[in-house]
Image: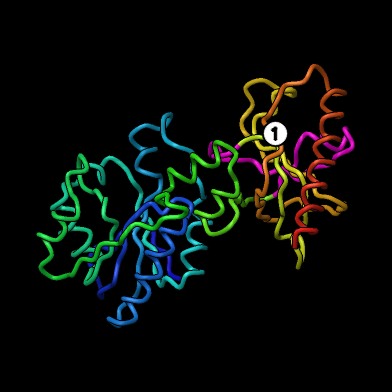
Amino acid sequence: MQVYRGFPAAASDHVALTIGNFDGVHRGHQAMLNRLAEAAEDLALPSAVLTFDPHPREFFDRDGAPPRLSTLRSKLEMFATLGIARAYVARFDARLAALTAEKFIAGVLVGALGTRWILVGEDFRFGRGRSGDLAVLRAAARTFSVEAMTTVTVDGERVSSSAVRAALAKGELEQAAKMLGRPYAITGRVAHGEKLGRDLGFPTANIALRHKPALSGVLAVRVRGLGDAPRSGVASLGVRPTVRIGERPLLEVFIFDFNAAVYGRRVSVEFLHKLRDEERYADLDALKRQIHADVAQARDYFATQTRGT
């Protein structure tokens, strides 16, 4: 897949396009991307995705924006897995936010990208003040055709990034996985930490987080990227209230029956079951006792899953 930062000055060819933030690349997004790839093949056009970084809501309200479900890299990897030929990553800034719906259509969709076919969601909004919608797009469609994607539901609930975040916030990881089509995961590189886990008898692989996570607590996890087979473990995701007040969120993973050096390795941590919320303990001895209990509970969870299969 070819990845472009921004837009070309002028289109050199034509594309079949879809537009969106695609945060989490959930089952609704996957249905859109599959439909895009299908239409692009029928029309003999490259399939292309226009997405934004940062998320527009982060631009307008950085502190109040919702947690991200995926990093830009993991989102692009999902696009490639689904067979998309091109991804345009537009920086959402004041200049882009100021474009009227009409100028966005003429300057970006037609002029820069050469769009011949476009797929958007039924609730798609674009342009300054979110003034553009599906009707505006269709009214301006002189050189391209427009298709609207129908809603995807799971257990009667509309699949959306907001719905996935709500499920994660409530610790409903199984429901989130149903909407995502896979377990919720965080991917990153293992970094050096303070070695506190090792001192407590539970050495951890630490992944620093650039953005506020959509989930917190102590969780049973599966780790990919440390060999051919995934490994089980228990993770703490949050701000470590017993260790330091006001700390930035950190992902710490204790991997069962594993003692290799993994600093610098890129791993994916899949969250399967929430054990408890974060708590602040009186001292490190109390924390150590709780970690023992967490590890035992997580091992019991995986044993139960194995018996169930």
User: On the rendered structure, is 8 left or right of 220?
Assistant: left
Task: Identify the residue at horizontal 13%, vertical 53% (top origin).
Answer: 102
Residue 298 coordinates in the image, percent (x, y)? 78, 44
**Residue marked by disc 1:** 276
Q: Residue drawn 33% across and 34% down?
A: 60
Three-letter amino acid code at the position of disc 1: Arg
Residue 251 image-quadrant placement: top right
Residue that lies at the very extreme toward the top in this rendered image: 282
Above or below residue 135? Residue 205 is above
Q: Is residue 164 above or below residue 286?
A: below
Q: Residues within 10 Å of mark 1 (few under 14, many from 20)?
A: few
The image's colour scheme reads rainbow
Image quarter in which the N terminus is found: bottom left
Tell me if 116 is positioned left or right of 159 in this view: left
Whether residue 32 is situated above or below residue 276 in the rendered picture: below
Which residue is rendered at x = 67% and y = 40% of the image?
274
User: Is 214 inside the magenta-drawn segment?
Assistant: yes
At 49% across and 39% down in the image, what residue appears?
A: 166
Q: What is the quadrant of the C terminus in the image? A: bottom right
Q: Which residues are magenta?
A: 190-215
Give the secondary structure at mark 1: strand
Residue 119 included in the magenta stretch of the image: no
Of residue 148 and residue 51, the one placed in the foreground of this image is 148
The prevailing secondary structure element of the residues shown in magenta is loop
